[in-house]
Amino acid sequence: MEARLSRLEAIVGQIGEAVLATTETIDRLAERVDALAIQVQHQGQQVQQQGYQIFALTDAVQTLAEAQNDSLGQLGQLTDTLGRLAAAIEATDKREGEG
């Protein structure tokens, strides 16, 4: 009987050790999962920040395109004005040459 009891105590001890080892393993895995979760969170924040940067860059490019379009319009008006001015000077030179 005593041998049985001793054997049962040994089995319970082994089960206890196995439970402790399993608990330690689970704790280490939980720490790794927490570290991965933090890493994923940081990466998510980086992606969000990059999204904001892309939005700002897109807005800046659109503003630049609009400004360039305005400049092209003004350049066209300037070209027309210079053409008329050149024609007027040419006409004046012709009249002076005739007179």
Image: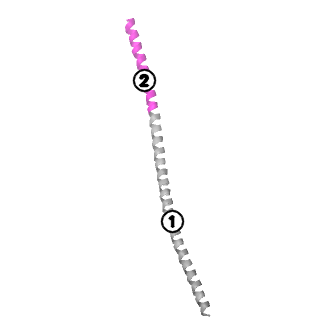
Q: Is residue 12 left or right of residue 59?
A: right
Check disc 2 and report its element: helix, strand or loop: helix
Quadrant of the drawing holding the C terminus: top left
Q: What residue type is labelled 2?
A: Thr
Give the Cα distance between marks 1 and 2. 72 Å
Q: What stretch is highlighted in magenta?
A: 71-99
Check disc 1 and report its element: helix, strand or loop: helix
Q: Where is residue 65 in the image (x, y as percent from the top left)?
A: 47, 37
Dot placed on the residue nearer the N-terminal end, 1 or 2:
1
Residue at 49% in and 56% down = 43
Q: Where is residue 98 in the image (x, y as percent from the top left)?
A: 39, 6
- Residue that carries the numbered disc 1 in the rendered image: 32
Depth check: give the residue in front, 97 or 62. Answer: 62
Residue at 48% in and 51% down = 50
The disc label shown at residue 81, or none: 2
Depth check: give the residue in front, 49 or 9. Answer: 9
- The colouring scheme, among rainbow, by chain, secondary structure or one colour, is one colour
Depth check: give the residue in front, 42 or 28. Answer: 28
At label 2, counting other C-alpha atoms closer than 10 Å, the crowd grade (few under 14, some 14-19, many 20 or more) is: few
- The residue mark sitting in front, 1 or 2, is 1
Q: Where is residue 26 in the image (x, y as percent from the top left)?
A: 54, 71
Residue at 41% in and 18% down = 86
Compared to residue 18, the image places residue 29 above or below, namely: above
Q: Is the magenta stretch mostly helix, strand or loop?
A: helix
Compared to residue 41, the image places residue 52 above or below, namely: above
Q: Where is residue 16 in the image (x, y as percent from the top left)?
A: 55, 81
Residue at 46% in and 27% down = 76
Compared to residue 28, the image places residue 9 above or below, namely: below
User: Are the two marked residues, 1 and 2, in contact with CB atoms closer than 8 angstroms?
Assistant: no
Q: Which amino acid does label 1 sit on?
A: Arg
Compared to residue 5, the image places residue 36 above or below, namely: above
Q: Is residue 51 magenta?
A: no
